[in-house]
Image (cartoon, grey):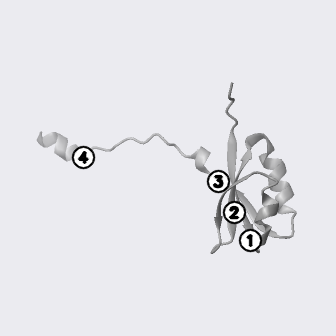
Amino acid sequence: MFKKTERQALYVWVYSLKWRKKLQHYGTIYYTSPKMKYVMMYVNTNRVAEVKKELSSKNYVKRVSLAHRKELDEHYVLKTDSKREEKE
């Protein structure tokens, strides 16, 4: 049976996008921005610290940062207009 693996998004800023092929070794590339020269990639959660440290030591990488999507609350509540409710 299929088992879901937790993944974390990493943003890797590079000096040149010709290194994109080398980054495939570390995880799954989801998006590449040619204008801003960054690569968004997904890495297994248990390997995030190891991959981030390894990528930071590469000479073609400017910086590496984690995506904060897991920290955000995705359960939204609609705010109703209290004045409208009083009128009705």
Residue 81, label in figure? 4
- Asked if disc 2 and disc 1 are in contact, CB closer than 8 Å, the reply is yes
Residue 67, label in figure? 3
Residue 39, label in figure? 2
**Residue at the disc numbered 1:** 17
- The image position of residue 74, as x and y in percent, is 50, 42
- Asked if disc 3 and disc 4 are in contact, CB closer than 8 Å, the reply is no
Task: Work out which quarter of the rendered image holds the C terminus and state it.
Answer: top left
User: What residue sits 68% from the left and 29% below the top?
Assistant: 2
Provide the secondary structure element on which disc 2 rests. strand
Earlier sequence position, callout 2 versus callout 3: 2
- The image position of residue 48, as x and y in percent, is 77, 47
State the CA–CA distance, disc 1 to disc 3. 20 Å
- Asked if disc 2 and disc 3 are in contact, CB closer than 8 Å, the reply is no
State the CA–CA distance, disc 1 to disc 4. 49 Å
Q: Amino acid at mark 2?
A: Val
